[in-house]
Amino acid sequence: MLTTLSPSAGTAASGTEFTIPDGVCGAEQVFSPSEGRAAPAVSDRVNILGVGATPQDLNTAVATLERWRAERRQEYVCVVSVHGLVMAQRDPTIRHALNHCGMATEDGMPLVWWSRLAGFSQARRVCGSHLLDAACAHGVPRGFRHYFYGATPKVVERLIDRLQKRHPGVCVTGYRSPPFRPLTPAEDAAEIAAINAAEPDFVWVGLGMPKQEKWMVEHLGKIDATALIGVGAAFDFHAGTKPRAPVWMQHAGLEWLFRLLTEPRRFAHRYLIDNLLFIGHMLQQVTRLRK
C-alpha cells in the first residue's frame, strides 16, 4: 500500500527544491483566473519511483497554465511517461529536471493507475498532444500566444497549419527548428533572442526525451515566457507525420504497443526493456526495498 501524507509545503515552482517521501507530498489548489474560482481538483505530487508526478485531469492542467500566465510566472512543464521514469533512475540530471518542474503531468496509464491507488481519483492521463490541443482551444478567446521549438521545418509548418485549421484564431507567434547537434553559445543566444522577440506566452518544445527536459532547465529564466512545455512526439502527431494509437488502446494503456508495432526498431528497447525495468522498480518501491 502506498503511503499518503497530508499536504505540507505546497507545489514547488520551477527550479525550487523539494523533497518527495514515499506517497504524496505538497498541495496546491489550482485556480482558474477566467472563472474566478478554484478548479475542482487539488494538484499534489505523487512519488512514483522518486519522481513527483502531478495527478490531475486535462482541464486542471490548462487552468494551471492560465493561472501562471495571469500571475506572470515563468515555469516549465514535463510530460512524464514510464520511459521518463526509468531514465530518471539512471540519470540524475533527468531526475532533477522532472522533480523541479512547475507541473509534471502523467503521460501513461501506469502512472494514472498508481496515483489512483494512492487515493487520487481525479488522476487522468495528460499527454503532450492532448495538452497542446486543449491549450490552443482554450487560449483562442483569451489571446494565448504560442511558439514552437523543435522538429524539422516541414513538420512544424504542417503542425501550425493543422492547428490553425482546427482552432481558427489561434495565435502562433513563430517557430524555430534547431539543428540536430549541440548549438554554439552564439547560436543559442540567437535562438533565445528570436523567441523573446516573438513575445510568446507558451513555448512548446518538441525535442524529445531527454533533450527537451535538459533544454528547458537550461533556458528557464532566459526565455521570457509563462511556460516552456516539453511535448515530445506531439509535434508529429498533430502534423500527421506519425499515427496515433486508437482511442481504446490509449485508454487501456496500450499505446506503447501500437508505437512498438509501427516503429519496432526505434522503440523495441524503450518499451520491452524499460517496461520490465519499470515493473521491477515499482515492486521494489511498493515493498519498501528502495531507499
Image (cartoon, rainbow, N blue to C red):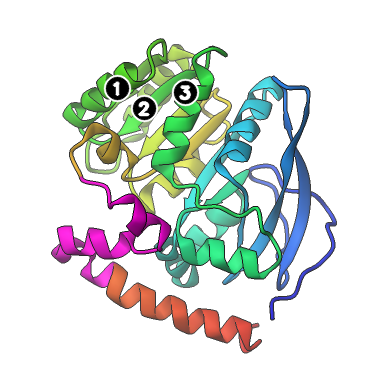
Residue range in magenta is 243-270
- Give whichever of discs 2 and 3 has the lower sequence position: 3
Residue 263 visible, this angle: no
- Secondary structure of the residue carrying tag 2 is strand
Mark identifier at residue 148 = 2
User: Can you give x and y, in whole percent of width and height, for residue 29 in the image?
Assistant: 78, 41
- Secondary structure of the residue carrying tag 3 is helix
- Give whichever of discs 3 and 1 has the lower sequence position: 3
User: Can you give x and y, in whole percent of width and height, for residue 190 in the image?
Assistant: 36, 22
Could you tell me which residue is drawn at 59 percent across and 45 percent down? 57
Q: What residue sits right under mark 1 in the picture?
A: 160
Q: Is residue 245 magenta?
A: yes
Q: How many marks?
A: 3
Q: What residue sits right under mark 3 in the picture?
A: 137
- Secondary structure of the residue carrying tag 1 is helix
255, above or below 161, in the image: below
The crowding category of the residue bearing disc 1, from other C-alpha atoms within 10 Å (few below 14, some 14 to 19, many at least 20), is: many
Specify the principal SS of the magenta part: helix
- Give whichever of discs 1 and 2 has the lower sequence position: 2
Residues at discs 1 and 2 in contact (Cβ within 8 Å): yes
Q: Is residue 38 left or right of residue 158?
A: right
The residue mark sitting in front, 2 or 3, is: 3
Residue type marked 2: Phe
In what quadrant of the picture does the N terminus appear?
A: bottom right
Could you tell me which residue is drawn at 27 percent across and 40 percent down? 237
Q: Is residue 268 magenta?
A: yes
Residue type marked 1: Ile
